[in-house]
Structures are given as C-alpha cells and as structure tokens.
Amino acid sequence: MPGILVPVDRSANALRAVEFVIRLAAVFRSPPQIHLLNVQPSFPGTIRGVAQLALEEHQREGLAALAEARNRLEVAGIPYAHHVAVGETAETIARYVTDHGIGQVVMGRSGMGSLSSLLLGSVANKLLHLAHVPVLLVP
C-alpha cells in the first residue's frame, strides 16, 4: 500500500490532519506507512560554513515542528517516518510525493481567507496542481 504523507508545521490545522490519519489508520488491518514532512524555507547564500549552520538550524526547527505530531502517532502506536526538507513548500511536498511513492497527502487547510487564497495562492492550492495523487484537506 502506498504511503500517506502528512505535511506538518506548528499549526493546529496540521495536528488535526495527524489526528485524522490516526483515526483513518484504525480502519486498516495493518496501518499504512505514514510519512511526516516539515518543510523549512530556503536560505540565501552559499558561503561554506554559513550554509552548514543554516542546515543545522533548519533541522532543529523542523524536528521541533514535528515533535507533537510524532508524539501523537507514537501514543497511538502507529509506525511512521519523519523528514525535514528545505525549499518552497508546495514544490518540496510534491517532489517528496514522487520520490517516495506516496499514494495520498492529508493536510490541514491553511488559515487564509478566500480572498487571500485567491490573490496569493495557498500551499494546498499549489499542491493540488503539482501532486499527482489525491490531496485530502482536513478542516
């Protein structure tokens, strides 16, 4: 069975998506492979040393953002993999879907209003165009 990807940031919306996946996993005979992904923004510059420090900081920030989601899956006894990536959020999620054979993305919807989403676009809107798998938005 292809895995389920849950993009996670520090938002309540992301944690609702994790809770949805926990409930969803209960209906399967064996739980699907869950992937948690936190995407950190790219950093400018390529100076050696500075880039390494930035990567280490991204890793720390990403792991902190994943902590509560990981805890909830562990308490539920659901196996998972977790990853921190750097890049533009929607493109990075779509690339992860392709690279890891993900079958579905489950994510919290953004907090933007409809006008902001229309003008700026949201990660979910962009991902719907980039990912070639179902994307389930959890309110």
Image: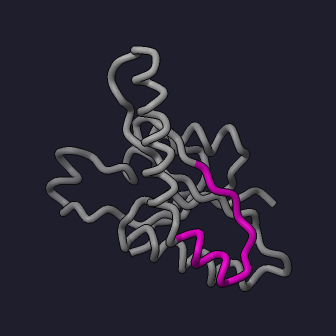
> Which residue is at 58% across, 75% downward?
71
Image coordinates for residue 115, horizontal then vertical, percent = 14, 56
Indicate whether residue 80 is drawn in magenta. Answer: yes
Q: Tell me, yes or no, if residue 115 can be seen here.
A: yes
- Residue 77 horizontal side relative to residue 137, left or right: right
Q: Quadrant of residue 113?
A: bottom left
> Which residue is at 21% across, 44% downward?
120
The magenta stretch is 69-83
Image coordinates for residue 26, horizontal then vertical, percent = 72, 85
- Residue 125 horizontal side relative to residue 2, left or right: left
Residue that sits furthest to the top in the current view? 47
Q: Tell me, yes or no, if residue 104 can be seen here.
A: no
- Please identify the quadrant where the N terminus is shown: bottom right
> Which residue is at 76% across, 68% downward?
32
Q: How many marks on residues?
A: 0
Residue that sits furthest to the right in the current view? 29
Indicate whether residue 92 is drawn in magenta. Answer: no
Image coordinates for residue 79, horizontal then vertical, percent = 75, 69
Image coordinates for residue 139, horizontal then vertical, percent = 38, 75
Tell me how the rendering is colored.
one colour
